[in-house]
């Protein structure tokens, strides 16, 4: 998949999941434009397990997340792109705003 096609795909995912709103959380605790939950953030190395099975965001951010400036669940575009890239196995950086 070319970079342009990937960006178009990710834009479609954002639109479907959150109407492209990075500051949204649904009733189940999935947050941001891609509606990521705690497990996705744990898998990507951004969040520590908090001992619950819910998306209650009572745990701690990892040093990796802190180094990227993540201080709350409503994380910016750059971090979300990095998370999605890590979860999908894509490692090529895509320039985007914060």
Image: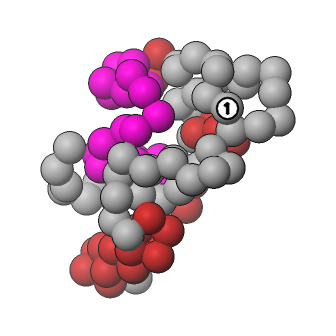
Say which of 69 and 86 sits in front: 69
Eyeballing the image, is 18 above or below 80? Answer: below
Say which of 1 and 47 sits in front: 47
Question: Which quarter of the picture shows residue 51?
Answer: top right
Q: Is residue 88 left or right of residue 27?
A: left
Q: Is residue 82 left or right of residue 3?
A: right
Q: Is 42 inside the magenta-drawn segment?
A: no
Eyeballing the image, is 34 above or below 38? Answer: below
Asked if residue 83 shows in the view, the reply is: yes
Asked if residue 91 shows in the view, the reply is: no
Image coordinates of residue 95 in percent, x first then y, are 19, 56
Say which of 10 and 52 sits in front: 52
Eyeballing the image, is 59 above or below 78? Answer: above
Residue at 36%, 47% in the rendered image: 23
Q: Is residue 78 left or right of residue 27?
A: left
Q: Which residue in the structure is indicated by mark 1?
A: 56
Question: Which quarter of the picture shows residue 67?
Answer: top left
Residue at 72%, 24% in the rendered image: 49
- Which quadrant, please, contains the C terminus? top left
Eyeballing the image, is 45 above or below 22? Answer: above
Q: Residue furthest front?
A: 27
**Colouring chosen for the image of the structure:** secondary structure
Image coordinates of residue 3 in percent, x first then y, are 28, 75
Give the magenta-colored segment's residue range. Answer: 65-86
Image coordinates of residue 10 in percent, x first then y, are 39, 71
Residue at 31%, 80% in the rendered image: 8
Q: Residues within 10 Å of mark 1 (few under 14, many from 20)?
A: few
Residue at 30%, 42% in the rendered image: 76
* Secondary structure category for the residue under label 1: loop
């Amino acid at each position: 998949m070319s970079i342009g096609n990937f960006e178009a795909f990710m834009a479609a995912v954002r639109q479907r999941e959150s109407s492209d709103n990075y500051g949204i959380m649904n009733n189940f605790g999935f947050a941001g434009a891609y509606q990521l939950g705690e497990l996705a953030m744990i898998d990507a190395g951004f969040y520590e397990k908090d001992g619950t099975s819910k998306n209650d965001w009572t745990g701690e951010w990892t040093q990796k997340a802190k180094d990227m400036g993540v201080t709350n669940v409503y994380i910016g575009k750059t971090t979300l792109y990095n998370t999605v890239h890590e979860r999908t196995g894509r490692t090529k950086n895509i320039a985007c705003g914060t």
